[in-house]
Structures are given as C-alpha cells and as structure tokens.
Amino acid sequence: LLSAATGSIPDYLSNTSANYWFTYSAANRMLYFKYNVCANDPSNPFSTFAATLLSTVDSNPVDNLVFDFRGNTGGDDSVINPLLNGIAQRLPRLTTNLNFVLYVAIDKGTFSSGMDDAEVFKEPGLGAPVRVIGEPTGGKPAHFGNVASFTLPGSQTPGQYSQQFISAPSYIPNGDPSFEPDIPIAIRSTDY
C-alpha cells in the first residue's frame, strides 16, 4: 500500500469527523464549505458557525463559493437554513462580481437531507450562476426521509428507519433515478 504520508488529502476528505467546516483561500478567492452531516453540533452550533462563515464572505473577495455535499447521508434538512438564508441575502452583492460562481458538489454518497439541501440551489430564480458538479446522487429526488433511530434490545445494534415520503421539488424531474450534476466529474483512484 502507498504511505498516507505521501501526497495530500483532498479537502473533501479532510475533517470527516466534523459535521461541517469551511476554509477560505485568498489565493483562489474561494470559500469552501463542507457539509458532512445534516445535524447540529452542540460544541459548534450551526447558527454560530453560519455567522462566522457569512462574516468571512462579507470581509473577503469571493469569486468561487463551494457547497460540498459529497458523502452527506442526511439528517435534518433545516439545520443549514441560517447559512442558506444568509447567502441568499448576499447574492445580489456577490453577483455584481462578474467572476462569481456558486458550485455545489454531489456524489453517490449524497442522500436524503443532504440531497434535499443540494437541490435547493437548482431552484429557478436564485439569481446566481450555479454549477452542480460531481457524480449523480445515490438517491432519487423523490425519496423517503425524516429518519428516526433505534437500537435493537438484544444485540444493541443501532439502526434507522424513514418516517416520511419526500416529494421531488417541482423544478427537479420526478422520474429521474438520481439528482444529476450539470458538470459530471467521475471519481478516480488518485482522488483518494
């Protein structure tokens, strides 16, 4: 096997134990947001996290804003709302920059609420150039969600079950087997 010490870890595989994180690259004028799980982290409440990210957007030039949902298997799709609302308020200013593009990264590991949150960016009238990149999602736009957890009493094995049917948004074709990217990008072995 190759040594983990050789090469670098791609951003989307960094900080996998964090529910969410972001970084700003001044050299690339890019803010990168990774959303690993649609769940609030009590040690880093999402509302506080979103305020910090939005403050970074406000105080730095941003040509590329990346929302990375790869590997996000879902949770509560409302957790991200403070960030989505804050970005929506800033889009009129951000889009005055002719170089501004909002990227949404998805893959086969994007399911349930993670997919629902990514689909929001395809809503007509958003007012920003949006490019969905990556691989088709692992689930259909119309799916079961609102997951509840349980533990089997004898083996103490944890599990989950869906409690609600989630219809596909009107702007996403319902019959599609997955949420498709605008720009397909296949995963290669070198990505790992």
Image: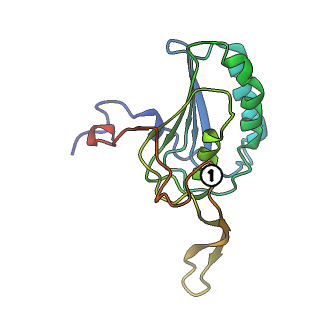
Of residues 6 and 119, the one drawn nearer to the viewer in this rendering? 119
**What's the residue at 58%, 26% (across, down)?**
129
**How many callouts does the rendering have?**
1
Tell me if 7 is positioned left or right of 100 in this view: left
- Residue 84 falls left or right of residue 173: right
The residue labelled by disc 1 is: 116
**Rendered view: 122 above or below 94:** below
Instruction: Identify the coloring.
Output: rainbow
Q: Residues within 10 Å of mark 1 (few under 14, many from 20)?
A: many
Image x and y of residue 31, in percent: 58, 24
Q: Tell me the residue at 69%/34% (across/down).
A: 125
x and y percentages locating residue 137 in the rendered image:
47, 52
User: Which kind of residue does numbered mark 1 sit on?
Assistant: Asp
Does any portion of residue 45 appear in the rendered image? no
Q: Residue at x 44, y 49 (%)?
A: 136
User: Looking at the picture, does residue 190 appear above or below residue 109?
Assistant: above
